[in-house]
């Protein structure tokens, strides 16, 4: 028997539970929103990580902590929110309770400072395997939320940063290649373990962008969520999808690996859409924040994502996104 995938489980099992509560957006966005007062809304998001699935036993505990916090921060960024505080639930086998959990807390301490958030509660249970779950709370000015559902035909499509670095980092942890220099290896592993949640960018895009999502599952898979929620189609120009110098060297002209970047997850960059008249302001924000922003395609009527090469030929993808599930 086939088991349900992550998205059909959310849709079929959990969505009916959320339907009565319009703050959840029917579980179809990066986070939920609740009204705090007449000026401010509360943004709520949860992410969990399990040993053997989201990280391996070689991953430093501090990096696991920072990745957990940063992946949650990325969802707040995708909603245009400002993070405030978080709760943490740890399900721990006995032998993780001493050094490992202390190093984990050290990692959180560093990033609490970096991002101005603090712990406000949680739960601690024993378990046969290690699972860590975090719920992050943030705030946003009322009705100023970035959503997945506002893209319109004619909008331009953008992405922040570079795409595919975390995926290469993951392949390095799995395949342990020995033909990679130390600096590049560090770059890819940093991108995998310590992504940069685009909080300032998300906040700056509120008035400029029509729809946004963060890249957790893969550029194409996450863009498909924008298309589904906005009821539009997207075309991605393969040659325009930004690549880091390190990734260019690592891929070394392998066109399959270049396309696979579009399906690799965990870059935690923002994909967003905006009308043409926002282009100048978007360029300005990119400069002000020092964050690379690249125009990678366009939105049109229809449904789904198409990738085209420099000859406007459609590029076929063997997999659209990474699923841990
Ligand atoms: P992201 O990759 O942005 O974290 P997910 O794909 O994990 O988003 O989740 C999509 C939406 O479904 C989110 O709004 C999330 O809160 C909701 N969701 C996921 N799992 C559950 C669950 N077990 N119960 C309730 N809502 C869920
Ligand atoms: Mg998200």
Image (cartoon, helix red, strand yellow):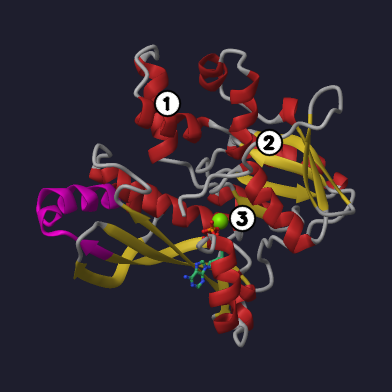
Q: Main secondary structure of the magenta part?
A: helix
For mark 2, does the 10 Å Cα neighbourhood hold few (<14), some (14 to 19), or many (20 or more) residues?
Answer: some
247 displayed left or right of 130: right
Residue in front for this viewpoint, 129 or 48: 129
Q: Which residues are magenta?
A: 90-109
Residue 282, percent across and down? Answer: 74, 42
Residue drawn at the location 58% of the way across and 62% of the way down: 7
The answer to whether the residue labelled 1 contacts the one labelled 2, judged by CB atoms less than 8 Å apart, is: no
Can residue 52 be found in the magenta stretch?
no
- Which residue does the numbered mark 3 point to in the structure image? 203
Precedes in sequence: disc 3 or disc 2 = 3
Q: Secondary structure at mark 3?
A: helix
The answer to whether the residue labelled 1 contacts the one labelled 3, judged by CB atoms less than 8 Å apart, is: no
Residue drawn at the location 86% of the way across and 45% of the way down: 276
Q: Secondary structure at mark 1?
A: helix
* Quadrant hosting residue 173: top left
Residue drawn at the location 53% of the way across and 22% of the way down: 247
- Which residue does the numbered mark 1 point to in the structure image? 187
Residue extending farthest to the front is: 1
Residue drawn at the location 38% of the way across and 13% of the way down: 181
Comparing labels 3 and 2, the label whose residue is closer to the camera: 2
- Which residue does the numbered mark 2 point to in the structure image? 317
Task: Examine the rendered structure and indicate whether residue 31 appears above or below residue 254.
Answer: below
Comparing labels 1 and 2, the label whose residue is closer to the camera: 2
Precedes in sequence: disc 1 or disc 3 = 1
Q: CA distance from mark 1 to mark 3?
A: 27 Å
Residue 183, percent across and down? Answer: 38, 18
Q: Is residue 40 visible?
A: no
Label 2 CB less than 8 angstroms from ligand 1:
no
Count of numbered marks = 3
């Amino acid at each position: 028997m086939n088991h349900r995938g992550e998205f059909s489980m959310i849709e079929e099992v959990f969505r009916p539970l959320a339907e009565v509560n319009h703050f959840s957006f029917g579980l179809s966005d990066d986070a939920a929103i609740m009204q705090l007062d007449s000026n401010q809304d509360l943004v709520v998001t949860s992410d969990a990580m399990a040993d053997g699935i989201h990280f391996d036993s070689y991953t430093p505990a501090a990096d696991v902590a920072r990745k957990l916090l940063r992946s949650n921060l990325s969802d707040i960024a995708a909603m245009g929110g400002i993070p405030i505080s978080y709760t943490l639930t740890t399900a721990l086998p006995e032998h993780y309770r001493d050094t490992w959990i202390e190093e984990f807390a050290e990692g959180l301490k560093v990033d609490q400072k970096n991002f101005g958030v603090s712990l406000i509660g949680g739960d601690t249970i024993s378990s046969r395997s290690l699972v860590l779950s975090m719920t992050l709370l943030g705030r946003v000015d009322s009705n100023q939320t970035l959503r997945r559902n506002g893209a319109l035909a004619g909008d331009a499509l953008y992405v922040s940063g570079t795409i595919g670095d975390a995926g290469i980092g993951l392949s390095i942890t799995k395949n342990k290649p020995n033909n990679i220099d130390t600096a590049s290896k560090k770059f890819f592993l940093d991108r995998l373990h310590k992504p940069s949640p685009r909080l300032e960018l998300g906040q700056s895009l509120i008035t400029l962008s029509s729809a946004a999502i963060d890249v957790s599952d893969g550029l194409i898979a996450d863009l498909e969520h924008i298309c589904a929620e906005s009821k539009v189609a997207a075309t991605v120009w393969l040659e325009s999808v930004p690549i880091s110098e390190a990734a260019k060297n690592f891929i070394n002209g392998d066109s399959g690996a270049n396309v696979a970047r579009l399906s690799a997850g965990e870059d935690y960059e923002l994909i967003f859409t905006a009308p043409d008249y926002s282009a100048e302001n978007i360029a300005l924000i990119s400069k002000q924040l020092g964050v690379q922003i690249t125009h990678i395609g366009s939105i049109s009527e229809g449904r789904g994502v198409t990738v085209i090469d420099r000859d406007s030929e459609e590029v076929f993808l063997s997999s659209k996104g990474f699923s841990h599930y």
